[in-house]
Image (cartoon, grey):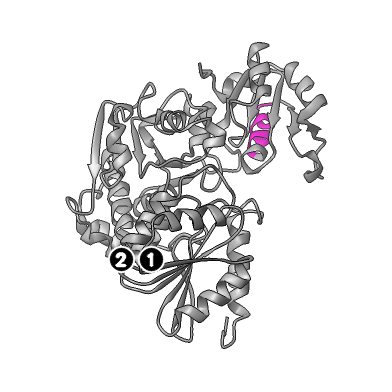
């Protein structure tokens, strides 16, 4: 059972912060603002030079067992044996977002989750809300946590991107929750596919949840209607064509759905102007698309290079291909293995009418290769490459004179890179090294 305690309950408690990434650092700042000096614990303390940090194995676990509460980073699975030991000893193991939601003004909060599209939808909702005159905090999994002492407090709306990791630590929900898509992901962390779905969608039916705004374009969401809470508002590009969304400048039908979800959330929150298409169209202007999300980097010798490094799952890669349905595409795919099934990607490739060259790379490259071989298509060819530089070069040669080289890996980056941004930088460096590139 998830603990129902808040940040303000932690004053005077013996506390530890487990995991010193972006959210972990915010957890430390928050505890210190409450007058609590936490024990700091990390799986890899050698990475942290500015604070005394204990290793999880040995000293760190012993120190946490002596605490009243451990605030863990989202990346630490609740299924780890250390969590089981801590809870068996009566130590509360909590997440920062869950602590914040316990005492937030939930009528002014929307949590946005989904296997794909949650970052884009969060960004669209925040941009529209600001354009409609609201003071907005947008953060969570995207950006900084809302409880960080450095975060603004003069806010009308909190628009919180929420990962499945974060949702697993939450015991109460705001009345409005959005789900942009559903597909298997993060299976090693959650344990199995069923548990992933249950924890991913738990925000929709926790105490306080009232309305779920959901994508009608996601078959698995329809299959899991029983997990979506008391009321669902389905959004599709067909039934709600958002003509007002054109000034956002986004590619692909999936982004029309994301825009519709963002608007529906603002309507449900009672934001003035959210039901006025002229006001929305004005608010949509000047939107800057997310970095590494279908971002056109440059054109070289007639070939467009597109950075979709944020694609860490099969669904966004399929959506990226759909955004270039009428173009020849050299797709660069592969990365860290998280037990994903690549058959849906292979099936989507087989449905394409335009020629596609799939350049498979890194850990999941062979897995993607096998999936494509199991779903053969006359218009799709797959070939392995030794890293991004080779894939960019081979993709460029094949795509000339008018095709697309698309980095949409359908996998996380951590087998070869620090994060998706590092992967995107290497992609751009490879483009800049091409003959004729002016990048």
Where residue 183 sits in the image (x, y, percent)? 40, 42
Up the image or down, 217 lies above or below 166; here it is: below
Where residue 268 sits in the image (x, y, percent)? 27, 38
Q: For residue 278, which quarter of the picture?
A: bottom left
Residue lying at 64% horizontally and 22% vertically, measured from the top left: 83
Q: Nearer the viewer, residue 254 or 366?
A: 366
* Highlighted range, magenta: 26-35
Determine whether the residue tagged by mark 1 lies in a helix, strand or loop: loop
Residue lying at 23% horizontally and 60% vertically, measured from the top left: 244
Q: For residue 155, which quarter of the picture?
A: top left
Nearest to N terminus: mark 2 or mark 1: 2
**Residue 379 in sight from this viewpoint:** yes
Quarter of the image with the C terminus in it: bottom right
- Graded by Cα atoms within 10 Å as few (under 14), some (14 to 19) or many (20 or more), the crowding at tag 2 reads some
Residue 28 highlighted magenta (yes or no): yes
- C-beta proximity under 8 Å, tags 2 and 1: yes
Q: Which residue is mark 1?
A: 286
């Amino acid at each position: 059972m998830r603990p129902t305690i808040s940040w303000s309950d932690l004053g005077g408690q013996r506390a530890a912060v487990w995991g010193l990434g972006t959210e972990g650092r915010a957890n430390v700042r928050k505890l210190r603002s409450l007058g609590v000096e936490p024990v700091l614990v990390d799986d890899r303390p050698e990475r942290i030079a500015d604070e005394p940090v204990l290793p999880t194995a040995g000293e760190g676990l012993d120190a946490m067992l002596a605490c009243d509460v451990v605030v863990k980073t989202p990346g630490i699975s609740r299924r780890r044996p250390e969590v089981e030991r801590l809870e068996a000893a009566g130590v509360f193991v909590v997440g920062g977002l869950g602590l914040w939601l316990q005492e937030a003004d939930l009528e002014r909060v929307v949590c946005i989750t989904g296997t794909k599209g949650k970052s884009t939808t969060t960004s669209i909702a925040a941009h529209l809300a600001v354009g409609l005159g609201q003071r907005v905090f947008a953060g969570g999994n995207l950006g900084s946590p809302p409880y960080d002492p450095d975060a603004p407090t003069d806010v009308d709306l909190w628009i919180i991107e929420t990962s499945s990791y974060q949702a697993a630590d939450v015991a109460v929900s705001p009345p409005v929750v959005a789900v942009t898509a559903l597909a298997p992901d993060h299976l090693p962390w959650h344990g199995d596919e069923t548990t992933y779905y249950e924890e991913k969608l738990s925000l929709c039916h926790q105490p306080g949840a009232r309305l779920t705004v959901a994508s009608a374009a996601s078959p698995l969401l329809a299959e899991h209607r029983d997990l979506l809470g008391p009321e669902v508002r389905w959004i599709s590009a067909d039934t709600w064509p958002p003509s007002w969304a054109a000034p956002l400048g986004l590619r692909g039908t999936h982004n029309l759905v994301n825009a519709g979800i963002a608007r529906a959330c603002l309507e449900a929150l009672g934001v003035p102007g959210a039901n006025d298409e002229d006001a929305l169209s004005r608010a949509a202007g000047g939107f800057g698309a997310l970095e590494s999300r279908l971002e056109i980097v440059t054109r070289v010798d007639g070939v467009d290079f597109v950075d979709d490094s944020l694609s860490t799952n099969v669904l966004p890669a399929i959506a990226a291909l759909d955004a270039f349905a009428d173009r020849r595409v050299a797709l660069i795919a592969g990365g860290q293995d998280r037990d994903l099934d690549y058959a849906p990607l292979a099936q989507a490739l087989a449905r394409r009418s335009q020629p596609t060259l799939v350049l498979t790379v890194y850990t999941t490259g062979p897995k993607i290769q096998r999936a494509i071989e199991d779903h053969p298509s006359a218009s799709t060819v797959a070939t392995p490459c030794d890293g991004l530089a080779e894939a960019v070069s081979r993709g460029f040669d094949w795509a000339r004179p008018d095709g697309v080289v698309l980095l949409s890996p359908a996998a996380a980056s951590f087998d070869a890179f620090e994060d998706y941004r590092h992967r995107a930088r290497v992609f751009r460096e490879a483009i800049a090294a091409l003959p004729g590139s002016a990048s």
